[in-house]
Image (cartoon, grey):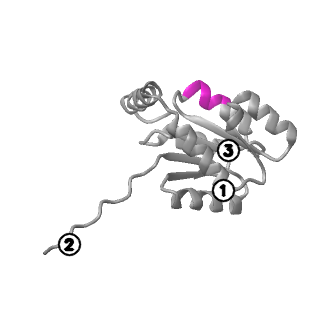
């Protein structure tokens, strides 16, 4: 009798981790991969924008630090995502109480995480976000992705 190969594990979703502190980024990215997510990494918002514009797959969740070097911080990145990537959720992580409050105002109350954060807490937030998605949000994100494919490479 021949043994049947097991199916490869299904990817739970696609996450973009944006964190300028490399060790923190590596730990959370690897943890999320172990949880079954496809994970892209960016060291700052400018890299994140490249990933968001060039990815062949829709990004389901952007998990970003609030305070980053570069042309924009996590708040500005979250605003860009809200304006340009319908269907992509954002979770902001910040260590300053003011930053966490502002993140709560910009995103859903449950889409901000104080730093230092527990990786399991981040995973739980992502899992709840993806589980709460309705078909309309998935359809919008898919249509947006197809539109980018037809437009050609980003300028």
**Which residue shows up at 48% across the image and 56% down it?**
36
Q: Which label sits in the foreground, 1 or 3?
A: 1
Q: CA distance from mark 3 to mark 2?
A: 43 Å
Q: Which mark is residue 64?
A: 3
Q: Is residue 48 magenta?
A: no
Q: Is residue 91 left or right of residue 53?
A: right
* Image location of residue 5, percent across then percent down: 25, 67
In the rendered image, which quarter is residue 24 located in?
bottom right
**Which residue shows up at 62% across the image and 44% down it?**
125
* Image location of residue 134, percent across then percent down: 47, 28
Q: CA distance from mark 2 to mark 1?
A: 36 Å
The residue lying toward the viewer, choosing from 57 and 109, is 109
Q: Residues within 10 Å of mark 1 (few under 14, many from 20)?
A: some
Could you tell which of marks 2 and 1 lies nearer the N-terminus?
2
**Residue farthest to the left?**
1
Q: What residue range appears in magenta? A: 79-84
Q: Which mark is residue 119?
A: 1
Q: Is residue 151 left or right of residue 47?
A: left
- Residue under label 2, please give it: 3
**Residue farthest to the bottom?**
1
**Which residue shows up at 71% across the image and 32% down it?**
109
In the rendered image, which quarter is residue 22 located in?
bottom right
- Label 3 sits on a secondary structure element that is strand
Residue 50, visible in the rendered structure: no
Q: Is residue 80 magenta?
A: yes
In the rendered image, which quarter is residue 111 located in?
top right
* Image location of residue 18, percent across then percent down: 65, 48
């Amino acid at each position: 009798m021949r043994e049947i190969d097991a199916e490869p594990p299904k990817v739970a979703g696609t996450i973009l981790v944006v964190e300028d502190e490399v060790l923190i980024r590596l730990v959370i990215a690897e943890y999320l991969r172990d949880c079954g997510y496809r994970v892209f990494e960016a060291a700052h918002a400018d890299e994140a924008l490249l990933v968001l514009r060039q990815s062949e797959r829709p990004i389901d969740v952007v998990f970003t630090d609030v305070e980053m070097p570069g042309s924009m911080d996590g708040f500005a990145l979250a605003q860009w995502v809200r304006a340009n990537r319908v269907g992509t959720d954002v979770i902001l992580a910040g260590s300053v109480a003011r930053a966490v409050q502002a993140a709560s105002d910009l995103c859903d109350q449950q889409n901000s995480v104080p730093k230092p954060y527990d990786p399991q807490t981040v995973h739980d937030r992502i899992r709840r976000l993806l589980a709460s998605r309705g078909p309309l949000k998935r359809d919008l994100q898919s249509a947006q992705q197809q539109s980018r494919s037809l437009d050609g490479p980003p300028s």
